[in-house]
Image (cartoon, rainbow, N blue to C red):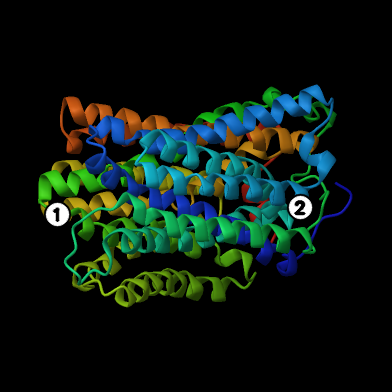
Amino acid sequence: MSTQNVKTNWAQFIPLVTVFFFWGFVAASNDILIPVFKKAFNLSQGESQLVSVAFYVAYTVGSIIYMIISYLTKGDLINRIGYKNSLALGLVISALGTLLFYPAANSGSFPLMLSGLFIVALGFSLQQTVANPLAIALGPIKTGSQRLTMAGGINNLGTTIGPLIVSFAIFGSATSGNTDMSIESVKVPYLVLGAAFLIVAVLLKFSSLPDKPEAVVEVEGDAKNNRSSALKYPQLILGMIGIFVYVGVEVSTASNLPAYMEKNLGFLTKDIAPFISLYWASLMIGRWTGAVEAFTDDMNLQKILRFIAPYLAFGVFLGVNKFMNHDLTPFYVYGLIILVLIFADMASKGNPARMLLIFSFLGIAALLVGMATDGMVSVYAFTSVGLFCSTLWPCIFTLAISGLGKNTSQGSSFLIMMIMGGGIVSWLQGYIADISNIQVSYVVGVVCFAYLAFYAWKVKGILKSQGIDFDTKISGGH
């Protein structure tokens, strides 16, 4: 890399994060569709998780298509058509997927619904391959992880709002008392979403985003680091597994929560949306907290913002739910759990490997508490997994592509491919829930977090052997 941005390019970064919002909106809305489809189509818990399977496996299929086209045309597809064009193309593909919701709802076809979600996610696959490394590239490398965390915070604004809007479209207001589930009612929100995809595609096409940004991560050390393929780097191989299990535990924890609350706690389907919203808002809370370093180098200001940012995000959640006429009383106590997140973030000191290790252990603890208790304590425990998943994506992604240089785009595609873990792990947990019970099935998430703790420990040594030390980068930035 010939030069390196010394400040975040906000004029380019802000339009980029609109696509992060869309990913979150649709992904979290799936958690409302799952119990609705389960009842409407008389599905088992395992079968209902096909919603997650169709959505997340599409990321893998999209990445494979991208690599096949790149191979057949003897050149990287994204580098050839440009980053802006790739983002716009991905949005158009997703818009085409939303069109299928109309005939699917009219005919009451579960396979057609799944096909629509699959195509939406197919477009997301291309968008993610471009947008994640691009978010890291739009500023100094020392704050790349924090910038990706900030983009994730916008993603989780979408995850917070998505379940509420889709639930409103299906059930009406929280005070209406309506318990009928109309499949046809999903048509309008998804058609509106498709129109939004097309509008943003046009806006991004004419934005100032770079078509061919400089390499995302500088190759440090000597020439031996400059390898012929991204798969030659062990940090990427282990990181691919890391992304698989991370997306798996993040998605499966939420997608199986409605069934747990219905079966074990007696909740009505229409009353679960605020808790799903809280789960995804928890990721927003954590990501807003983890992103403060991207705003300022002033250590004293960072300490203040670490307490302000999470409660500001929590306030967004409360405000949105108040607007939707939901009772906020059950959620105030959650403010105390947020303190655990704040102190864990401070203990990580901005090091992605250390943060991954600490938050993985906290995720294990949260799941074990949820499995060992009942009532609202278990709900808060399972929901707090969102807090501890919040910054893991940028940590894993940054660690996995560090040092890849010219292979960064290829490495990013391999990582996006592993998002399929969201579908496969969710299905596995649903299957275990069918043969045992839902509370026991959360052991799947414990195993996922255990691997992430191992990766955090292992990758630090791998990167040091290549001359990459995040402690040095971070200390050199202040």
Q: Furthest-right residue in view? A: 2
Determine which quarter of the picture holds residue 4.
Answer: bottom right
Which of pointers 2 and 1 lies earlier in the amino acid sequence? 2
Q: Which residue is mark 2?
A: 84
Q: Residue at x 14, y 54 (%)?
A: 267
For residue 264, side relative to residue 300 (left or right): left
Q: How many numbered marks appear?
A: 2
User: What secondary structure is found at the residue carrying circle 1?
Assistant: loop
Quick one: 314 or 192, which is closer to the camera?
192
Quick check: 17 above or below 439? below
Quick check: 351 above or below 80? below
Q: Is residue 457 visible?
A: no
Q: Which residue is mark 1?
A: 267
Quick one: 144 or 190, which is closer to the camera?
190
Quick check: 272 above or below 334? above
For residue 33, side relative to residue 221 (left or right): left
